[in-house]
Image: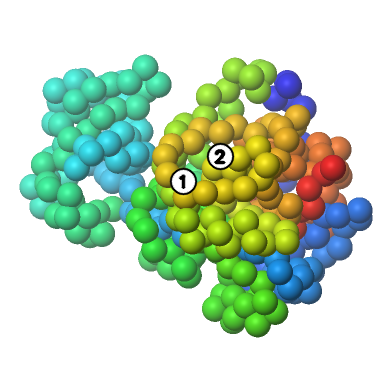
């Protein structure tokens, strides 16, 4: 499909620069046969006993580093303390060059990839490097939020309350809306909660630069689903994926009959209209940017015309877009 089919006019002032508090006070647009505007706190009203919510519990690491005028965004752990990363400006970096950071930490440019990324070997052992990141790294906010400049509060705000295994360089943002109170209310209604892990890569920030979706290449991301989690998902009457990352991992792991088993590996699944969903019935997700792979995914899930109308409604209602914005609850188009 032409990428232009997924374009729409988004007023820039609707891109949220800070989250609302409390988290579950954000708006929730329910997109079914028609549109209804609610809040995240109303989510239990739209779910039923026996439903299963699937969350991505990956934790965001402080993956943005600076060395003079060089900006490094760690993208993917290769092994030990060797990382694949975006560098800006990257053209000036040569293979064999050393990049120096604080506390006498350095990184060797081992390789430059055709994509423009670099392979960096840091001078610290993995545990010491993690401590260094906590001290010197910055939360990698998307460029649409304050130009990517993180504030101290983002260390808490740009992280789900259930985040555990470290590895993401972008938050699974639909999960940012959940509070402990909301999770308790869902469980009290006998709605199961299952946690998968997909380490979100920096590729989520990258714009689609081709004209046809068939030419776009997604970055690989590592994910895991335990046997226990697979069993919870298999028992659920309806599967509600919280976020596109949860959905992409569930769909990557699901068999043709929709069942899941324990799974681990890398996925670069790219979902566009025409894709046949195997397991997800309802998707909770934030509002995405024009011509983004995420808007293509929701258009595949609910229908392009329906999503175009829903986003126009959201814009008219002045809902807040992207990572710190409001959310929508989408029912699968059949």
Callout 1: helix, strand or loop?
strand
| Circle 1/circle 2 CB separation < 8 Å | yes
Q: Is residue 59 left or right of residue 204?
A: left
Residue behind mark 1: 263
The nearer-to-camera label among 1 and 2 is 1
Image point (59%, 75%), residue name = 183
| For residue 93, above or below residue 123 | above
Residue behind mark 2: 252
Q: Quadrant of residue 166 in the image?
A: bottom left
Q: State the CA–CA distance, disc 1 to disc 2.
A: 9 Å
Label 1: few (<14), some (14–19) or many (≥20) C-alpha neighbours in 10 Å: some
In percent of width and height, residue 46 lies at 79, 68
In percent of width and height, residue 25 lies at 67, 73
Q: Which mark is residue 177?
A: none
Look at the image and name its color scheme.
rainbow
Image point (37%, 17%), residue name = 114
Q: Quadrant of residue 131 in the image?
A: bottom left
Front-most of residues 117 and 319: 117
> Looking at the image, is mark 1 or mark 2 earlier in the sequence?
2
Q: Is residue 72 visible?
A: no
In percent of width and height, residue 62 lies at 33, 54
Front-most of residues 145 and 187: 187
Label 2: few (<14), some (14–19) or many (≥20) C-alpha neighbours in 10 Å: many
């Amino acid at each position: 499909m032409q990428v232009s089919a997924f374009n729409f006019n988004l007023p820039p002032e609707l891109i949220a620069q800070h989250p609302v508090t409390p988290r579950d006070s954000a708006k929730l647009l329910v997109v079914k046969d028609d549109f209804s505007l609610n809040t995240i706190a109303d989510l239990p009203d739209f779910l039923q006993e026996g439903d299963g919510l699937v969350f991505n519990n990956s934790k965001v690491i402080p993956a943005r580093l600076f060395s003079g005028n060089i900006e490094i965004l760690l993208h993917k752990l290769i092994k030990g303390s060797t990382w694949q990363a975006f560098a800006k400006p990257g053209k000036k970096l040569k293979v064999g060059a050393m990049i120096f950071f604080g506390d006498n930490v350095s990184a060797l440019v081992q390789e430059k990839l055709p994509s423009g990324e670099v392979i960096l070997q840091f001078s610290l052992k993995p545990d010491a490097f993690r401590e260094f990141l906590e001290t010197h790294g910055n939360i990698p906010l998307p460029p649409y939020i304050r130009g990517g400049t993180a504030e101290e509060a983002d260390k808490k705000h740009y992280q789900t309350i259930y985040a555990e295994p470290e590895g993401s360089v972008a938050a699974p943002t639909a999960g940012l809306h959940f509070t402990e109170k909301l999770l308790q209310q869902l469980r009290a209604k006998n709605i199961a909660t299952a946690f998968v892990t997909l380490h979100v890569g920096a590729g989520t920030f990258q714009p689609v630069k081709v004209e046809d979706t068939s030419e776009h290449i997604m970055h690989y991301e590592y994910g895991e689903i335990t046997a226990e989690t697979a069993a919870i998902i298999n028992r659920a009457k309806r599967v509600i994926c919280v976020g596109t990352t949860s959905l992409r991992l569930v769909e990557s792991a699901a068999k043709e009959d929709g069942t899941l088993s324990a799974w681990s590996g890398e996925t670069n699944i790219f979902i566009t209209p025409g894709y046949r969903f195997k397991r997800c019935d309802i998707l909770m997700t934030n509002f995405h940017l024009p011509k983004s792979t995420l808007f293509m995914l929701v258009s595949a899930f609910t229908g392009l015309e329906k999503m175009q109308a829903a986003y126009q409604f959201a814009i008219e209602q002045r809902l807040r877009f992207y990572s710190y914005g409001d959310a929508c609850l989408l029912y699968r188009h059949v």
